[in-house]
Amino acid sequence: MSRLGNKHKGKRTLDRNAVERLSPQTNWEHQQAVNAWLRRNTADKDKTAIFFTLKFHRKNNDGFGKAGISETYASKLVSKWLNRLDRELATKREVARGCRIERVVFKHKGFSGENLHWHGVLLTAEDADLLLSKCERYWQQERVSGWVDAKRSQFEIARHNYSVSAYAAHEVYKLGVEDSWSLEHTNMPNNGLSIAKQEAEQRRQRTLELREMRLKHEQSSFI
């Protein structure tokens, strides 16, 4: 198989996977779209941002090195932690109706690709210091699972809402918006999430169209 496509009777046929591989800036365009959305939706001077990093342990795996927590279980622990914070500001019924703390949350895997953790930002108009203390305490309490690394986790009140939000999203370029943006944990008003995803997908489609045009042009030289 060639780098650009499949060889068939002396001609190169269009390989959709090759088109994807020839689009290294696709995820970067996703990153730009997400950053633009964050700039529009998190730079609210009337709300305080609490930046958080949620870390997990790696455990010995019966003599076969160390194994990390599964993404499914880690995601459930993050959901449980966020739900407890939501219940500080709303009743159970209100939380079920979607009355939750505004936040953006992103999954990361680090340089190794195996360091699973989450970065995110809580936006609140309430007592930020009180919420910060509860963030720390509730995550500490999740240590009973045996996986939560409270010592390496981080919680702090941010000076600039957008800057920490952009940092929380900085692995979109590597993982892609679908894998990195933890939509099940994010809560923002004004349907902004779907708009951001649409913008990213439109950029991606434009990139693919350009790559296809280029491949078709190159194929013509082999006819």
Image (cartoon, grey):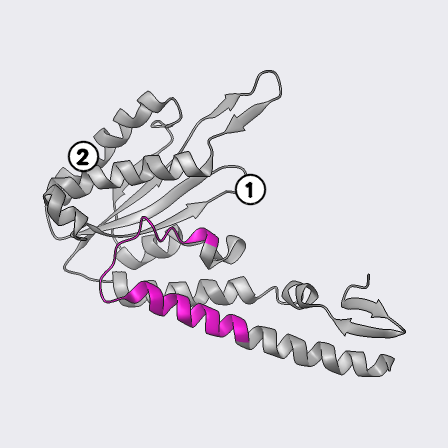
Write the start and end of the magenta stretch as one range. 179-205
Position of residue 56 in the picture relative to residue 14 (left or right): left
Residue type (three-letter) at the residue carrying disc 1: Gly
- Magenta residue check for 200: yes
Q: Where is residue 149 in the image (x, y as percent from the top left)?
A: 38, 27
Q: Quadrant of residue 220?
A: bottom right
First of labels 1, 2 by sequence position? 1
Q: Position of residue 210 (x, y in %)?
A: 62, 79
**Which residue is at 44% across, 66% downward?**
32
Where is 182 relative to 60, above or below?
A: below
Which residue in the protein does label 2 denote? 134
**Which residue is at 18% across, 34% downward?**
133
**Which residue is at 52% across, 53% downward?**
175
Which residue in the protein does label 1 denote? 113
Q: Position of residue 45 (x, y in %)?
A: 18, 61
Q: Quadrant of residue 161?
A: bottom left
Element assignment for label 1: loop
Position of residue 66 in the picture relative to residue 155 (left or right): right
Q: How far apart are labels 1 and 2 at the CA level?
A: 30 Å
Q: Which dot marks residue 2?
A: none
| Image quadrant occupied by the N terminus | bottom right
